[in-house]
Image (spheres, rainbow, N blue to C red):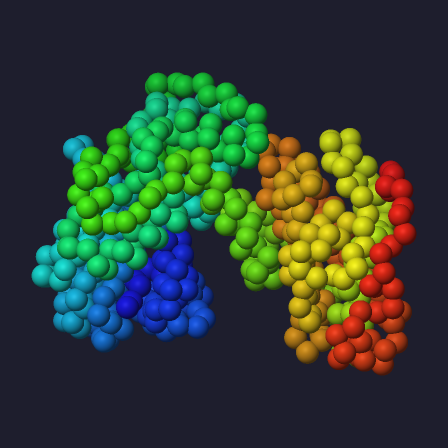
Amino acid sequence: MAVAGAGGYVGARLVDRLTADGHQVRVLGRRPGTLPSGPGVARRVVDVGDPGATGEALAGAGSAYYLVHAMAGGEGFAARDRALARSFAEAAAESGVGRIVYLGGLGDGDLSAHLASRHEVGRLLAATGVDVVELRAAVVLGSGSISFEMLRYLTERLPAMVCPRWVDTRLQPIAERDLLDYLVQAMAVPAGVYEIGGPQVTTYAEMIGHYAAVRRLRPRLIVKVPLLTPSLSARWVDFVSPVDRSVSHALIESLTAEVVVRRADETARHFDVEPLGVAEAIALALDEQAERIPSTLFAREEGLFDGVYTVRVEEPVDLDLAPAARSDLDRAGGDLSWYGTVRGWRLRLALGRLLGERVALHRPLAVEEGAAVDWWTVRRRDASSLVLATTAWFCGEAWLGYRVAGPGDRVELVGALRPRGLPGFLYWRVLRPVHAVVFRRMARHRVVRARRLPPATAAALSASGRAPTGAGRPAPRRPRPSG
């Protein structure tokens, strides 16, 4: 099967789901850097606006998902959506695709430009005679969804907010997990239009309350101003949220109309999905994001992405010191001197205690997945890398990763923070210049420590898989460090 638009949020998640289920997936997109890769994935760099090239890319694919939209291009997106849909439908018909599954949007009556375009695309895809299953959904509750990221930033950063009347518009969000279930099952149901959503009809204001409760934030004060237009509220969202403006503006315009499931019985007859409620969907979205970070930490770009701040530094290391640097990762815990910048860490822990943190130093018997290292938990340990995670900080969830990369030419240090509430956001913003300096020194410290272990000894230890002397013994109890 093929997935057009595989570089987008839903497309990437769907490809992961399909390959995990054992499917061979052909992914289509214009930008190779955004396309998924890995076992079971065949990449096709193609513009779906070119029917000839798209037909070649679809040749032999019995079915296809169409997850393309042009909102990110700004003004004129409806015309671009129309042209892309016609091109893809023509290519699918000529290449023998038997079914197209398309993800559109809920809504009836007087629709926004965005929702009207979504409905029009569904009609155009079905116009060539290929079987089309059109799933119509509203807000998707999953990390990476623009709607979810708007909800995240507004709730996390604003203890009180002035909101337009659209925060009381009724909508029926759906969990990312449930959306993927519907997309997978859509290959085996009769062609047609199906409305999908979670079990709750809610409002944006109520979702803000659910998100705050899940994140253990104080209830948010919402002051509603009926005269605040969608255009003005979009600019207000721009100020608070870093999401793509061209997309968020179109979505905000859509929030003025109800988007709820009105034909649930037809969907229930053909799909076997038990959807999650709003609070459960938000909690799952956050949990799944946290679960993904340890495995993707070293691939993360520096800066803010989907609510997580990332900083990364690299430090050169001589080839003969690489085994020592790798072995030293097994000595983590029990002493601030392992991290370097001891005074900085003492100040950081003292600040944390003032704000309610209760952490202590601890060295485990073995630095392995699941072990407690100081205030961290080991989330990944392999021959060249170590990833630590903590939920004990007042400012949010944090990850710290070390890797001796390549054949041994550099030490990589990557830190990530998912801030909790306004204190977490301010913590990162205020200390951002400090982090840049401290992380650089921490990376250099790995090289300094590597020099203290004879290269031959480190190489032997790395080859045998044993930790250096003392790494396997619990550290003596120490008082908590003070500022």
Q: Of residues 166 and 192, which is closer to you in this image? A: 192
Q: Of residues 42 and 447, which is closer to you in this image? A: 42
Could you say which quadrant of the image residue 422 lies in?
top right
> Which quadrant would the N terminus be assigned to in this image?
bottom left
Q: Position of residue 208 (x, y in %)?
A: 45, 30
Is 75 situated above or below 127? above
Left or right, residue 40 beside residue 472:
left
Q: Of residues 319 and 480, which is closer to you in this image? A: 480
Q: Position of residue 256 (x, y in %)?
A: 29, 30
User: Residue at the spot x=87%, y=38% of the render?
Assistant: 483
Could you say which quadrant of the image residue 21 lies in?
bottom left
Q: Is residue 429 visible?
A: no
Could you say which quadrant of the image residue 86 lies in?
bottom left
Q: Position of residue 374 (x, y in %)?
A: 77, 49
User: Residue at the spot x=87%, y=39% of the render?
Assistant: 482
Left or right, residue 440 beside residue 78:
right
User: Residue at the spot x=73%, y=31% of the render?
Assistant: 355
Left or right, residue 222 beside residue 58:
right
